[in-house]
């Protein structure tokens, strides 16, 4: 399927929001960078969003970062479908989907897909798992986006409010960012190792 229409619609909504920030709230122009970052963070590149939500929550309170993050979250989610949905029929991915371990995981996911996506979006659980299962399992993109938002918005609220209430020093936020990046990188390298290990018994 092609997801150009929702991508164009939400990109226009993002453009309107950017213009609104530029002309009505120029003192909050840093949030434009935040919007771009959140698109990438909610796509398959999955950059950690926690440090920036802490930082912008500290500066602007919990409302602005959450409001600004919603549209990029939608765009990033649809981008995943736009990029990876056409790849579902590739032979290498077909072979993966025929593997017993994949079918077992997909079976449990398919019992409660919407709830599973919400839980993974809300918690620190590795979200790439449900991203892959949703796209390659042909779960409807609109339902996927709705579930992501239902999980992400409370998560964003918690992080932004935490940044405001804790009023963390920038050095500490940088340390948190580095720690989260190391965890993400370690998880990525571990997955690559497991994949190579599976391919070379």
Image (cartoon, rainbow, N blue to C red):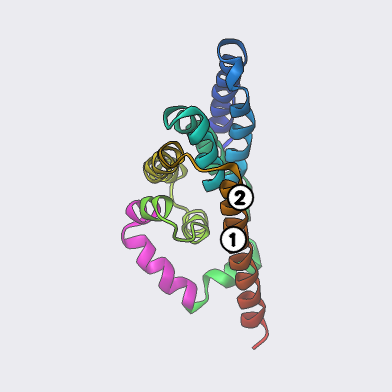
Residue 17 visible: yes
- The magenta region covers 101-117
Q: Is residue 186 above or below residue 127?
A: below
* Residue sitting nearer the eye, 74 or 85: 74
Nearest the camera: 48 or 7?
Answer: 48
Q: Residue at x 50, y 55 (%)?
A: 131
Q: Position of residue 183 (x, y in %)?
A: 58, 63
Query: Looking at the image, is 195 positioned above or below residue 127?
Result: below
Label 2 or label 1, whichever comes before in sequence order: 2
- Say which residue appears at 41% left-offset and 45% top-offset: 155
**Magenta stretch containing residue 113, yes or no?**
yes
Residue at 38% over, 63% down: 109
Residue 123 as seen in the image, left or right of residue 80: left
- Residue 62 located left or right of residue 38: left
Task: Inspect the magenta stretch and tell me whether residue 36 lies in it.
Answer: no
**Image location of residue 179, percent across then percent down:** 59, 58
| Number of numbered discs visible in the structure rendering | 2
Quadrant containing the C terminus is bottom right
Q: Which mark is residue 140?
A: none
Quadrant housing residue 198: bottom right
Residue 9 location, quadrant: top right
Q: What percent of the width, then of the height, locates residue 180?
A: 57, 57
Residue 69 seen in the figure: no
Q: Which residue is mark 2?
A: 47
Circle 1 residues within 10 Å: few <14, some 14–19, many ≥20: some
Considering depth in this image, is 176 or 52 the residue closer to the camera?
Answer: 176
Residue under pointer 1: 184
Question: Do callouts 2 and 1 mark residues in contact (Cβ within 8 Å)?
Answer: yes
Asked which secondary structure carries label 2, the reply is loop
Q: Main secondary structure of the magenta part?
A: helix
Q: Quadrant of the N terminus?
A: top right
């Amino acid at each position: 399927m092609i997801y150009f229409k929702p991508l164009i619609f939400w990109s226009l909504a993002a453009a309107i929001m950017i213009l609104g920030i530029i002309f009505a709230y120029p003192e909050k122009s840093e949030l434009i960078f935040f919007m771009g970052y959140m698109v990438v963070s909610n796509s398959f590149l999955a950059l950690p969003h926690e440090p920036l939500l802490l930082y912008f929550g500290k500066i602007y309170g919990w409302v602005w970062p959450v409001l600004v993050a919603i549209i990029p979250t939608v765009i990033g989610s649809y981008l995943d479908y736009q990029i990876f949905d056409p790849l579902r029929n590739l032979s290498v991915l077909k072979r993966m989907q025929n593997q017993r371990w994949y079918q077992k995981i997909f079976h449990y996911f398919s019992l409660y897909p919407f709830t599973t996506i919400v839980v993974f979006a809300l918690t620190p659980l590795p979200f790439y798992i449900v991203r892959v299962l949703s796209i390659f399992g042909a779960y409807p993109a609109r339902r996927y986006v709705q579930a992501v938002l239902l999980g992400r918005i409370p998560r964003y609220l918690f992080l932004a409010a935490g940044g405001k209430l804790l009023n963390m020093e920038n050095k500490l936020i940088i340390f948190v960012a580095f720690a989260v990046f190391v965890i993400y990188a370690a998880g990525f390298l571990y997955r690559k190792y497991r994949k190579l290990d599976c391919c070379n018994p």
